[in-house]
Image (cartoon, grey):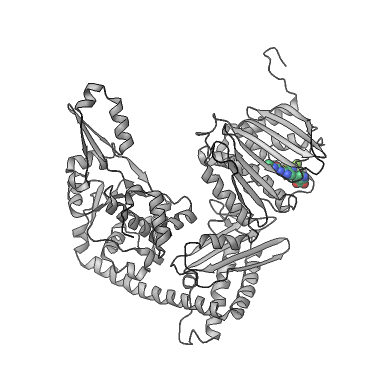
């Protein structure tokens, strides 16, 4: 210690701290962001080490605990991080792994067979960005302990604190993110749970538990263990859907240390859910593993259909789009040396995987079709229907395009804004003509367009593109957006930066909102993903006292606002419940819901496609019971909705 009672470091530890200091200076370079997403990234860095240990064949159980103080503990029953003095750094290997940037697997001697690659930045980054970190290693009948503080300073070097049974091995890490680095320090249980569950699906036989100790009622947590692996993932995604065939097709193969597997099942919906992973990382932009499967799927189905004379000689071949309608598919590849490509590194580049995926899939799937002729028939029929619908949709689209250009009908509905600059333009989709009228008067006509909806829009969950295109309201929306639809969709042609759904806060309003969201999610997903869709929040109450007019969104805000008033003002305040958009005059509507300065918008996101899909399925699909249950659980005021 020096005279200020601060620890004095020798030159090698100074180098180490300079490394960690670099992480603290530019955390974004190591974990992407310092928002909630970055915060959760810390957990994945640590969990990845346990998963790697599981992939190496030494670990069967992993546990994640959110502690009361918002620190997180990750436990595994692997071999335990090596504790010996490391020959290069002259400190224990655990300490090296937690203090030297990019140490990780390189120091392990054996190294990992398969590793996340992207997530490999590792334990030292978590240490650098934490207020404190404690590591316990169970090994050789001893519990070894080390503690770091304030961005990776070792305050207790590795020492034995206890004995344990000789059979007990593993690593336990607890860390508390540094609030000076992160915008928030509150972990979200659901975010962690969804990914933990996904990791359990992707690594069959591995048990993953998550527990929230901040929640007094959660004493056991949830354990995810799937012996069926990705087959069970497919079953899970298809839970609310109607399958086209009973079996879940599961195929796998290995070559030169590359493991490839795929699980799939068709359902009666018109959408595909294809998710692919490499070393447990979602490859959002696909890549060679996905290409191999898609190519083989199209080829095998066409060959089978031709051979059995379901597709006649004169018939055109089924396309990739036809054969993927209604498919749920998980593709998982474990690769010792993955090449991630593209701007977001979400694409697998290794070319040898294309061949492996194609071989494994085509051989296995061909065999499945031969052995299960009834299922084969059902699958091919589904693809043929998709093909016919695609052709019908093309014709309908051609008609739509012509009629919209030719008639003034469309322009009679839309009150467009004067600006032609999409960056500043917004469109309000408004329920009903009367609200449309006040919105039109109350808008800023320079940047705000109004599209009143007259009829009910079609429930697209139950309709293919061709039927959707025959619905006038939907055609108007497509024309207004400017992006086209289906194969022609082009996000760069979107005419508005914000698409704002403005509906009443009642049952009809929420029904229309859900119909619109279904439409957007199914046919304009990139618009939702790019964050262009919003819900306007019209106020529920108006409070008047003296010359003051105040609007609030809900009961809680009303109560809060009233509490804030002095007693004599409160008792004389006039409270009016706003009945609907139509009853507000133009000025009121502008002031409360449309004015860029004053309004409150809620951004509509698709954060978890699987979850969102399930919600739409529940709300809009054929099955009445889950829909009723969902609505009961999620929206008190929608209870009377006619389902
Ligand atoms: C809760 C976090 O870190 N588990 C873990 C990490 C390692 C090992 C086992 C391990 C790896 C190897 C050999 C090897 C790590 N070791 C290293 C290094 N859980 C958690 N479990 N023995 C044990 O890769 O050869 C880095 S991570 F580099 F020290 F070997």
Task: Please provide percent x and percent y for residue 568.
Answer: 22, 21
Residue 352: which quarter of the image?
Answer: bottom right
Task: Please provide percent x and percent y for residue 334.
Answer: 66, 58
Q: Nearer the viewer, residue 49 or 220?
A: 220
Quadrant of ligand 1 in image: top right
Image position of 235 with respect to 280: above or below: below
Which quadrant of the rendered structure holds the N terminus? top right
The residue at the point 41 percent across, 54 percent down is 630
The residue at the point 56 percent across, 45 percent down is 192
Which quadrant of the rendered structure holds the C terminus? bottom left
Image position of 352 with respect to 100: above or below: below
Image position of 326 with respect to 616: above or below: below
Q: Nearer the viewer, residue 606 or 344?
A: 606
Residue 456: which quarter of the image?
Answer: bottom left
| Left or right: 50 in relation to 480 | right
Residue 358: which quarter of the image?
Answer: bottom right
């Amino acid at each position: 210690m020096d005279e200020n009672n601060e620890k004095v470091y020798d030159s090698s530890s100074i180098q180490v701290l300079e490394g960690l200091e670099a992480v603290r200076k530019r955390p974004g370079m190591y974990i992407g962001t310092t928002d909630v997403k970055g915060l959760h990234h810390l957990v994945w860095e640590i969990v990845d080490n346990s998963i790697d240990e599981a992939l190496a064949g030494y670990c069967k159980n992993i546990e994640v605990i959110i502690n009361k103080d918002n620190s997180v503990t990750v436990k595994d029953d692997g071999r335990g991080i090596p504790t010996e003095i490391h020959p290069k750094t002259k400190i224990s290997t655990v300490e090296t792994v937690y203090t030297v940037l990019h140490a990780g697997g390189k120091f392990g001697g054996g190294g990992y067979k398969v590793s996340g690659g992207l997530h490999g930045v590792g334990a030292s980054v978590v240490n650098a960005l934490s207020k404190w970190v404690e590591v316990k290693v169970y090994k050789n009948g001893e519990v070894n302990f080390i503690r770091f503080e304030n961005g990776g300073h070792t305050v207790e070097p590795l020492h034995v604190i206890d004995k344990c049974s000789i059979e007990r091995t593993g690593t336990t890490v607890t860390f508390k993110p540094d609030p000076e680095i992160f915008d928030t320090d509150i972990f979200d249980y659901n975010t962690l749970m969804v990914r933990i569950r996904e990791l359990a699906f992707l690594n069959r036989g591995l048990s993953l538990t998550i527990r929230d100790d901040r929640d007094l009622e959660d004493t056991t947590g949830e354990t995810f263990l799937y012996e069926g692996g990705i087959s069970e993932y497919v079953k899970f995604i298809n839970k609310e859907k109607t399958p086209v065939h009973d079996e879940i097709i599961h195929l796998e193969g290995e070559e030169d240390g590359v493991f490839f597997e795929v699980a799939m099942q068709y359902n009666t919906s018109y959408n595909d859910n294809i998710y692919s992973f490499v070393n447990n990382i979602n490859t959002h932009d696909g890549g060679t593993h996905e290409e191999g499967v898609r190519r083989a799927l199209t080829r095998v189905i066409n060959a089978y259909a031709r051979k059995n004379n379901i597709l006649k000689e004169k018939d055109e071949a089924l396309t990739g789009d036809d054969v993927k309608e209604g498919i749920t598919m998980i593709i998982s590849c474990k690769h010792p040396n993955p090449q991630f490509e593209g701007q977001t590194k979400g694409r697998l580049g290794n070319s040898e995987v294309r061949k492996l995926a194609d071989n494994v899939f085509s051989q296995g799937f061909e065999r499945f079709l031969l052995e299960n002729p009834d299922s084969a028939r059902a699958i091919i029929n589904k693809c043929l229907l998709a093909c016919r619908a695609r052709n019908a949709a093309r014709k309908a689209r051609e008609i739509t395009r012509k009629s919209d250009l030719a008639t003034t009908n469309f322009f009679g509905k839309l009150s467009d804004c004067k600006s032609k600059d999409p960056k500043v333009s917004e469109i309000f989709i408004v329920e009903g003509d009367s609200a449309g009228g006040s919105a039109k008067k109350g808008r800023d006509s320079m940047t705000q367009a109004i599209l009143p909806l007259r009829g009910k829009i079609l429930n697209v969950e139950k309709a293919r593109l061709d039927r959707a295109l025959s619905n006038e309201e939907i055609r108007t929306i497509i024309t207004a957006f400017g992006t086209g639809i289906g194969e022609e969709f082009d996000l760069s042609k979107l005419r508005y930066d914000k698409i704002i759904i403005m509906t009443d806060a009642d049952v009809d309003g929420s029904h229309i909102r859900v119909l619109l969201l279904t439409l957007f999610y199914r046919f304009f997903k990139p618009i939702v993903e790019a964050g262009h869709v919003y819900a306007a929040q019209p106020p529920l109450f108006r409070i008047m006292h003296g010359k003051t007019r105040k609007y609030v969104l809900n009961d809680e805000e009303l109560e809060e606002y009233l509490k804030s008033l002095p007693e004599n003002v409160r008792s004389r305040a006039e409270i009016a419940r706003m009945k609907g958009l139509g009853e507000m005059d133009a000025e009121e509507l502008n002031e409360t819901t449309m004015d860029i300065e004053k309004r409150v918008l809620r951004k509509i996101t698709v954060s978890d496609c699987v979850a969102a899909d399930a919600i739409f399925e529940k709300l809009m699909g054929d099955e009445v019971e889950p829909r009723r249950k969902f609505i009961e659980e999620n929206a008190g005021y929608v209870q009377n909705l006619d389902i």
